[in-house]
Image (tube, rainbow, N blue to C red):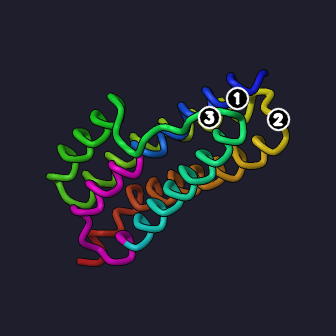
Amino acid sequence: MDNKEVADRLKSICQLDIDAIHAYIKANDHIEQMDIKSNISKFQSDHARHVKDLSDMIRSYGGEPPEFSKDFKGFLLQAFASIRGITGTEGALKALRGGEKMTNSSYHDAVSQDFPPMVMVLLRRNYDDEQRHISYIDQCLNTRVWEKAA
């Protein structure tokens, strides 16, 4: 894989993390339970770290990272989060789960490719975060923890 191909693939993943940040911001507006809100804010911060680290890596391979704006998928994710958010915590979590499925799939595909070792370290660390995010969201949805807090 040449430098341009590495940078282009990382740019695609980075854009998905940017889109996730926008969806997290929108969804978190509809979550009332402080413990869930706190964890969701931490996950949003993880996505921000992913963007920074991926952007640095993209530059090191001669590429230009994406701007911090939504692409078409981002607009869809935010629209989905807005619609789901109308139903409160459950809807917001379901919207985030949809986005996390996309980021998990993207990172899963990336860690199975033949990236240079330093890129693989970054991708695996980010993928671990993504797995933690979706696991927490699924746990909340399965236990309906927001109902017990009421």
**138 vs 104: above or below:** below
- State whether the magenta stretch is mostly helix, strand or loop: helix
> How many labels sit on residues?
3
Q: Percent x, y for residue 28? A: 29, 62
The tag on residue 10 is 3
The residue type indicated by label 3 comes to Leu
Q: What residue is shown with label 2?
A: 116
**What residue range appears in magenta?**
20-37
Q: Residues within 10 Å of mark 3 (few under 14, many from 20)?
A: many
SS category of the residue bearing label 3: helix
Of residues 74 and 130, the one drawn nearer to the viewer in this rendering: 74
Which residue corresponds to the image point at 62% horizontal and 38% vertical from the top-left?
Answer: 107
Q: Residues within 10 Å of mark 1 (few under 14, many from 20)?
A: some
Toward the right, the furthest residue is 117
Q: Quadrant of residue 11?
A: top right
The tag on residue 6 is 1
The residue type indicated by label 1 comes to Val
Q: Using residue 25 as the reference point, say whether residue 52 is left or right of it.
A: right
